[in-house]
């Protein structure tokens, strides 16, 4: 049986939306000084889903490159993590399974715990692979983040999906050693079933996140994890990229270490490039941080990277990945940049119209306007059923 040390992330790919709204357009609308967005929260633009995009189309677009490169024979489990679920019963992963033509001998399930869900999926995947080293698990983190118009949270919206192939002898990152865990029953951010947009207590959510940083690190240390100075970089959940800086400063403080800005930048600066232009992608965010680090950093072969996954409510986990020598040959840097660059810029009025757009709930046929140009589209509702198409 394979040991934990040889299981990890074999491949990683992400997709984002058809549209993008620059923060300059939001600032011009609401009169915010742009420095607050660019420097205060560290965001330049946010991905905005077209009417015919959702977590299924994004998830399929993220995962397809993995199935093309590796085939589907070894994938026996698909775990889709999301907090912007499209159905109370059916897993969005079943639609993705169908769009990608995965074998019927597959288990598919959806996981939820706010932005933390994908990390639970990765940990469960490691357990499955440990039990059956021949199988690979396809983990998909897919979310569309939506807050009320004209609310403080509006500037921290975004959308993306990350697909991870978890298996033995990974080409990218080995998941290494113990996890530090933390759960606290807090109401910092939540979305009741009857709402499209999340409710949030912004300052409370930042405090809850920092408390979770401290809690996970304490447990990680007690579990015998690596010392802080063994990590070359830290990938944090990034609801906005300045949060990674706040989180790392808090971790350094907790450990009684210096908190100079240059040191914090060295630890987290290379993880923020995608999140700064995509916005909050909830479950996908920490893995977009990992993608940015791998795509941009100098050779990290053999180095340890800390990952801190936080999901409001709240559950958090700190764990370590060791970057596999030769990983750069397997990266998808060009495709990732293309996914970001291909987005079409919206003006504020068009963004607002999309934000307010919703389906009637009468069960009749409602095609979606054809707006997206990607491989998969959400064609509409027919008799309360979601209909997807491959182009
Ligand atoms: N130039 C430079 N910086 C400026 C500025 C200017 N002109 N004006 C303000 N700033 C700075 C502020 O000083 C502040 O920095 P610090 O936090 O370092 O003090 C920063 O910009 C933000 O300003 P405010 O705190 O006044 O901003 P706000 O009250 O409008 O809201 C927010 C910020 C709370 C993050 C809000 O966007 C929000 O509610 N977002 C959603 C919740 C969220 O993302 N929470 C994060 C933790 S929870 C989590 O991680 C789970 C999840 O995914 C949701």
Image (tube, rainbow, N blue to C red):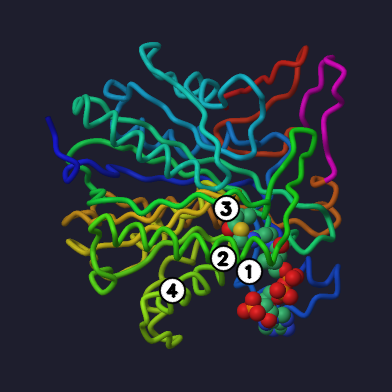
Question: How far apart in space, not on screen, are marks 1 and 4 (Cα)?
Answer: 15 Å
Name the residue rendered at 47%, 22% in the picture: 97
Question: How far apart in space, not on screen, are marks 1 and 3 (Cα)?
Answer: 16 Å
From the image, tell me which residue sits under label 2. 276
In the picture, measured across the screen, residue 120 lies left or right of residue 246, that is left
Question: Is 93 covered by the magenta stretch?
Answer: no
- Tell me the mark number nearer the camera, choosing from 1 and 4: 4
Q: Which corner quadrant holds the C terminus?
A: top right
Assess disc 1: are there few (<14), some (14-19) or many (≥20) residues with their C-alpha within 10 Å of its C-alpha: many
Q: Can residue 35 be seen here?
A: no
**Residue 46 higher or lower than 18, as above or below:** below
- Of the two numbered discs 1 and 2 on the same chain, state the one appearing first in sequence: 1
**Residue 255 higher or lower than 238, as above or below:** below
From the image, tell me which residue sits under label 3. 342
Secondary structure type for disc 4: helix
Pointers 3 and 4 in contact (C-beta within 8 Å): no
Pointers 1 and 2 in contact (C-beta within 8 Å): yes
- Of the two numbered discs 3 and 4 on the same chain, state the one appearing first in sequence: 4
Secondary structure type for disc 1: loop
Name the residue rendered at 65%, 63% in the picture: 45
Secondary structure type for disc 3: loop
Residue 368 at x, y percent in the picture: 77, 29
Secondary structure type for disc 2: helix
Name the residue rendered at 33%, 30% in the picture: 137
């Amino acid at each position: 049986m394979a040991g934990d040390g040889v299981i990890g992330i074999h491949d990683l790919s992400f997709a984002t939306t058809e549209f993008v709204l620059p923060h300059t357009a939001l600032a011009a609308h609401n009169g915010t000084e742009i420095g607050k967005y660019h420097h205060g929260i560290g965001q330049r633009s946010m991905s905005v889903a077209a009417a015919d995009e959702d977590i299924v189309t994004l998830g399929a677009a993220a995962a397809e490159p993995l199935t093309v490169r590796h085939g589907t024979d070894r994938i026996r489990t698909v775990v889709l993590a999301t907090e912007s679920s499209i159905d109370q019963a059916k897993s969005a992963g079943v639609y993705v399974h169908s769009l990608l033509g995965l074998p019927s001998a597959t288990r598919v399930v959806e996981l939820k715990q706010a932005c933390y869900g994908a990390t639970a999926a990765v940990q469960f995947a490691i357990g499955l692979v440990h039990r059956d080293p021949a199988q690979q698990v396809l983990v998909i983190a897919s979310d569309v983040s939506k807050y009320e118009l004209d609310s403080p949270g509006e500037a921290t919206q975004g959308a993306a999906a990350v697909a991870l192939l978890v298996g033995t002898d990974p080409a990218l990152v080995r998941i290494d050693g113990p996890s530090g865990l933390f759960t606290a029953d807090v109401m910092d951010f939540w979305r009741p079933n009857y709402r499209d947009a999340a409710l949030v207590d912004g300052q409370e959510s930042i405090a809850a996140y920092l408390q979770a940083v401290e809690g996970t690190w304490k447990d990680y240390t007690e579990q015998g994890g690596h010392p802080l100075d063994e990590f070359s970089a830290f990938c944090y959940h990034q609801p906005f990229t300045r949060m990674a800086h706040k989180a790392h400063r808090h971790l350094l403080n907790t450990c009684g270490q210096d908190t100079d800005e240059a040191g914090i930048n060295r630890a987290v600066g290379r993880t923020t490039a995608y999140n700064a232009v995509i916005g909050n992608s909830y479950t996908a965010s920490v893995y977009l941080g990992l993608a940015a680090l791998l795509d941009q950093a100098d050779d990290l072969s053999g180095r340890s990277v800390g990952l801190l996954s936080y999901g409001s409510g709240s559950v958090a986990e700190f764990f370590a990945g060791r970057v596999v020598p030769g990983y750069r040959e397997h990266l998808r840097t060009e495709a990732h940049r293309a996914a970001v660059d291909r987005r079409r810029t919206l003006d504020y009025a068009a963004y607002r119209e999309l934000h307010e757009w919703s389906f009637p709930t009468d069960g009749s046929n409602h095609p979606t306007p054809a707006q997206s140009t990607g491989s998969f589209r959400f064609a509409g509702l027919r008799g309360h059923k979601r209909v997807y198409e491959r182009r």
